[in-house]
Image (spheres, rainbow, N blue to C red):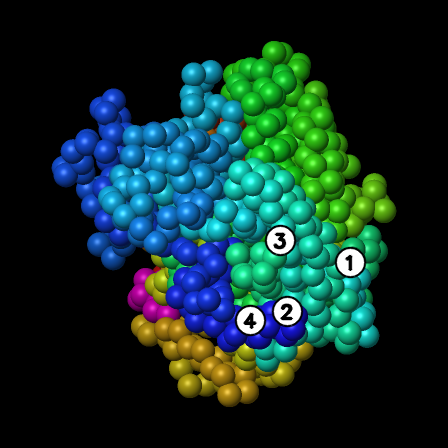
Amino acid sequence: MMMDRYKRLIVAGALMSGLVTAAYGQTSPTAPSSVPSDGAMARNVQTLATGWRFHQGDAPADVTTSAFNDSAWETVSVPHTWNRVGFYRPDPQNHIHRAETVNKAQGLGWYRQRFAAPAALSGKRLWLEFDAASRIASVWLNGKKLGDHAGGFSRFRLDATDAMLKGGENVLVVRTDNSAPSGKDSATADVLPLTGDFFVHGGLYRPVRLVAVDPVHIDLADFGGSGVLATTASASASAARIDVRTRVTNADRRATAARVAVSLIDNEGRIAASTQTALKLAPSATQDAALTLDVANPHRWQGVADPYLYTLSVDVLDARGRLLDRVRQPFGIRTIRFDPDKGLFLNDQHISLRGVGYHQDREGKGWAIDPSDVAADVAIMREMGVNAIRLTHYQHGQTIHDLADRYGLLVWDEIPLVSAWTRRGELEPRAALIDNARQQMRELIAQNGNHPSVITWGIANEVDFGNSFPAFLTGYPEGKTPDPLPLLKTLQDLAHATDPSRPTALATCCEGRLFDKGTSIPTTAVAADLGGANRYFGWYFGAAGDLGPHLDALHALRPQQPLSVTEYGAGGATTIHTDNVLGGPIGSRGLTQPEEYESYIHEEALKALDARPYLWGTFLWNSFDFATTIRTEGDAQDINTKGLVTYDRRIRKDAYYLYQANWSQTPTVHITGRRYTDRAYRVTDVRVYSNADSTDLLLNGRSLGALRDCPERVCVWRDVALTEGSNTLVARGGSVEDRVTWTLSPDASANVRIDAGAIVAAPAARRFGSDNFFTGGKAGTLVKPADYGKPAVPAVIAGTPDSAVAATYREGRFRYAIPLADGRYTVTLTFVEPSLSAGARVFDVRANGKPIVKALDIAAVAGGVSKALVRTANVTVRGGKLDLSFEPRKGDAIVSAIEVTR
C-alpha cells in the first residue's frame, strides 16, 4: 500500500517537472519538483533576484548591520557584475563596450538585500544558496556572520536558520572580492586561479536563493551538490545498473527513522526502476544511503544521436510515509571508454569528438549571463556541428550542463588550476592553496557528477611551462621552478576517490616543443588518466604543418595514454585582412592578426586532426572571443580574438563555416574573405567552404566552373580576375548559395604595389597590398614585435616617407610572378639593408629574364643599414605576367617594396 502511494506521488511529480524547469530556467538541485500528498511543498525555494543594493569599493564598518542606510547605493538585479572588460577598436558607436564604458576594477563589491521569510517556514531549516560569488565572499544575515566561501565558480550554501527572522524583514549582506591574487597580503592569494588568460569578473554573477527544507532532508552541505550522486555502473541494451548514493541529514536534536526511495522515471512518466531503504538517523548527523537501481532494456543516452534522459527522483519519507524532501534531476544511462589507438566509445559506439573551448562571458554582461544567453551560445555551437565542449578554465554553471545533457554534447569539466600554483617567488604551494584546490575539485564533482554529458574531470591547465619564463617575471630563484606533480597527484587521487567512474584529464602546453637551451619542462601529462595537448603551431611557435608530426611523437611517447588536442587555433580580427596568409610574420601578440590567417591555421589543423584516429577528442580554441586584460591584439583591446564568433556574437568568422561544412549536416556554402571588400589586387584566389556535392562559382553572372570533392570541404578557384568597380561573387551548391561583393579601385585595377614581407600591408601614401605572388625566400621585419603588455616598436627607415612599408622585406633566392594586363610599366623597387655591412650582400634583379638591377650592395650604396634605396626600370609585359627574379651573388637577395605602375 505504501509503495503504491509512493508511485502515485512520483508520477504526479513527473508531470510537474517540466513546469518547474521552465520557471527556473535551468535544472536546480534545490528547485521544488512535486506536491506531497498533504499539499505542502517538501522543499521551498525563493529566488532573490531583484531589489539588491550595490556598492563598489570599501564600506563603513557598520555596513553589515540591519540599520545601515544603503539608500544611496545602486539598485541592481542578480546575477550581477560591475565589470565590463574588452572592446573592439573599430566602429565603437555600434558596441556596448567602448574605451569609456569598460570597468576593469578588481576589489570589493558589496550587496545588500531585504526580504521576508514567511512565518509558514517556522520549523524548517533555512539555507542561503549562491550559485557563484567571485572570487571570495562573506555573508551576513541580520548582522550575524554566516560564513565565507573561497572560489568564484562553484555553488555554496550557508545555514541561515538561527539568524533568520520568520515573518519579518531580513537584511542580507554579501561582500565579494575579485582582487587579483598578488602579494602576500592579498585576500585571494591562495584562491585559484592565481593567473590565466581570462578576466575574473567580480560579484554575485549567478542566482541567489533562499531554500527551506524539513529538518530531515537531503544534505545541503554536500559541497554545493544535490546530496545525490548517481553512477551508471554498467549498461547494455538489455540491462543497466545504477548506483545511487544519497546523503541524508537529520538536523533535529532527536533521533528519527526515515526511508529513502529512489526511482528512475522515463519521459512518459513510467517508473523504469525503483528501490528504497530504511534509515535510523542519529540527531544532528548526516548519513549515506547506498542504493542500486536495476533497469531492464534501458534507453541509453547516445550523445547527439539520441540524448535520451530519464528523471532520477530521490525521496526522503518519514516513518508514516510523509514526504520530507525530494531531489529530482535528469539522468542519462551511458558508459564511456577511451582507447589509446581508436579514440572514445560511448555505449561501445565510436564517437569522433568535435569540440570547442568555451568561456562564460559576453559583451555587455561579462559573467552575469542568464540561461537564454547560454542557450543562444549552445545553439551557435550546435549549428557549427559541435558535439563536445571543454568548459574552460573553471567550473561553469548548471545551465550549460543541463543543455549539454539535453542535446547530447560531451563535456570536459575542469577546476581553475591554470599555469601557477605558488605565490610569486615561492617554490611550494601553501597549505591554504592546496586546500582550496581540493575544495574546488570536490565542488566540481559534487555539483556536476550526475550529468551524463560530463566525461572527465580536468585537474589542471598548462602547469608545465617550467623555467621557460624569465626569472624577473616569476620571482623564482635562478635555475629553480616549482614542481607541479605533488599537487597534481593530490588532485588525481581526490578525483578518483570522489568519483571512480570518470577518468581525470590534464591539458599541457609545452612537452615536446623546441625551447632555448637550458629550458627545462616538467612532464605533467603522466599525472592524469587522459592526455590533452594545447598546441599553437603556426601561431606562437613553429609552422602550421608541424602539428600532425608533433602529435604522432606524443602518441608514440605514451602509447597507452589516450590523447586529445585541447587547444589549437589563432587570432582573427574581422577588420584586418591579408592577400596571402604566407606573406609575412604573424603578430601573435600584436595587431597583425588578419581573419584569413585564422582560417588558414584551422584549415591546416583540421587536415592534421582528421588524419589521426587515435585522438579521443579535439577542442578548438575558442568558440567565442572573450575578455582578458593581457592583450592588445588584432582590432581589439583586452579581448582574446581566437574565437570563431565575436565577443558580441554578431559575426561568425570565416573559420566557423569551415567547421560547419565539415562537422554538420547543414547544407553550407560560404565564400571566405567576405569582409575584405576593398581589394588590393586585381587577381586573387577565391575560397569557398562547401559541403555540397558540387559547387559552382559565378563572377558578375559568369560561371567560373564547378568543383567537386574539395579536400576538407575547401574549394579554391585560382587566379580569379576582378574588374574595375563592383564585383559580385556567387557560390552555389545544391539549393544553397552565398554571395559577396568586392570592389576594385581604378588604381588597383591598373597597378600593383606589394609590401614585401608583410602579411598585412602597412598604410602608406599609396595603397599597397600584402606580400603576394612570390615563390621562395623568407619574410622578415625590422619592427620589434609586440609581446604581452608591450606594443610593437616601429622601425625608423631613413630616406622614405613610408617607413612601415620599407621595414618589412623578403630575402633569399625568390621570384614574383605578378599578373598584369599586357603593356608598358614602370617597376619601382625599394631596398633596405636590415643588418649587414657593405660587401656582405650582393644580388641582381631580373624582369622577364632581363637584368634591371646588377650587383646591388645596399649597405654600400645607401651608406649603412635602415636606409631606403630606390631603383626604377621600365618593362614590357606580354602574356599577362611580369616575372621578377631576385638572384643572390653573395648572401641573400632582398626587397622591401615592389611597385608596378602603368
> Residue 495 sits in which quadrant?
top right
Q: Which residue is mark 4?
A: 9
Mark 4 or mark 2, which is nearer the start of the sequence?
A: 2
- 539 relative to 183, above or below: below
In three-dimensional space, the C-alpha distance between marks 3 and 4, rounded to whole angstroms, equals 17 Å
Q: Position of residue 416 (x, y in %)?
A: 55, 38
Label 2: element kind: helix
Residue range in magenta is: 742-749
> Residue 133 sits in which quadrant?
top left
Q: Residue at x 65, y 62 (%)?
A: 262
Q: Position of residue 78 (x, y in %)?
A: 32, 49
Q: Which residue is mark 3?
A: 258
Q: Residue furthest top?
A: 477
Label 1: element kind: strand
Q: Residue at x 25, y 22 (%)?
A: 61
Residue type marked 4: Leu
Q: Which residue is mark 2?
A: 2
Could one spot residue 410 in this view of the protein?
Answer: no
Crowding around mark 2 (Cα neighbors within 10 Å: few <14, some 14 to 19, many 20+) is few
Query: Would residue 305 be found to the left or right of residue 204 on screen?
Result: right
Asked if the magenta segment contains residue 553, the reply would be no
Q: Which residue is mark 1?
A: 233
Callout in the foreground (3, 4): 3
Crowding around mark 4 (Cα neighbors within 10 Å: few <14, some 14 to 19, many 20+) is some
Crowding around mark 1 (Cα neighbors within 10 Å: few <14, some 14 to 19, many 20+) is some
Q: Position of residue 789 (x, y in %)?
A: 42, 30
